[in-house]
Image (cartoon, grey):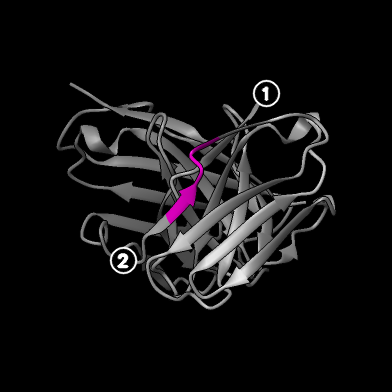
Amino acid sequence: DIQMTQSPSTLSASVGDRVTITCRASQSISSWLAWYQQKPGKAPKLLLHKTSNLASGVPSRFSGSGSGTEFTLTISSLQPDDFATYYCQQYKTFSEYTFGQGTKLEIK
Amino acid sequence: QLQLQESGPGLVRPSETLSLTCSVSGGSISGSSYYWGWIRQPPGKGLEWIGSNYFTGKAYYNPSLKSRVTVSVDTSKNQFSLKLTSVTAADTAVYFCTSDGSGSFWNYWGRGALVTVSS
């Protein structure tokens, strides 16, 4: 299994801040990484795939970068709607998908 | 816009079989080259991919669950289903039905169904 580790586990920030969440893979996954946003009691929402491709309807303040084993999700200017838990997911090998443990983004 | 809705028992006894169905609206399973599958989330924990079925009927499973899981598609009802055998308390989770054309990440999600395994 490819292990995905996110940091930090919890992040406190204010509206308007620029924030970055890191996701590390236990082996190289090239650019085969997706990011999701999940709010309490709701299903996850796809934000980005193949590291940096925005999903349909996702605001441009979300961006992704990285390759190999280290990846980042950046929110350029936090909005009230962005406080949620974020998950990365690798899909290097078909049908062997794993997720990070999640990063909870809280209001400071 | 594709919409997915899970249904099934909220309580399953240990050692029995968990069965869930996902009803699809806004699109046809047989008319789309999509993958139809399931992801689960234990209470307060992270996400785990369970398995998917391509519209042709070929299924793919998480190696750690493969011996207990079946994901199947019923095109006549525009539904797909999950069966997980020999359940234990560790299988208690919110189960999400999912879909996407990629088969590797998921754009469409149901609202989730909590299944508790308990006697």
Q: Which mark is residue A1?
A: 2
Front disc: 1 or 2: 1
Q: Position of residue A20 (x, y in %)?
A: 66, 49
Q: CA distance from mark 1 to mark 2?
A: 35 Å
The residue pinned by badge 1 equals: A108
Q: Position of residue B118 (x, y in %)?
A: 22, 23
Sequence-wise, which precedes: disc 1 or disc 2? 2
| Quadrant hosting residue B61 | bottom left
Q: Is residue B77 visible?
A: no
Q: Is residue B68 visible?
A: yes
Residue density around tag 2, few if under 14, some if 14–19, many if 20 or more, within 10 Å: few
- The amino acid marked with disc number 1 is Lys
Q: Nearer the viewer, residue A4 or A94?
A: A4
- Residues at marks 1 and 2 on the same chain: yes
Q: Quadrant of the C terminus of chain B?
A: top left
Extent of the magenta region: A5-10
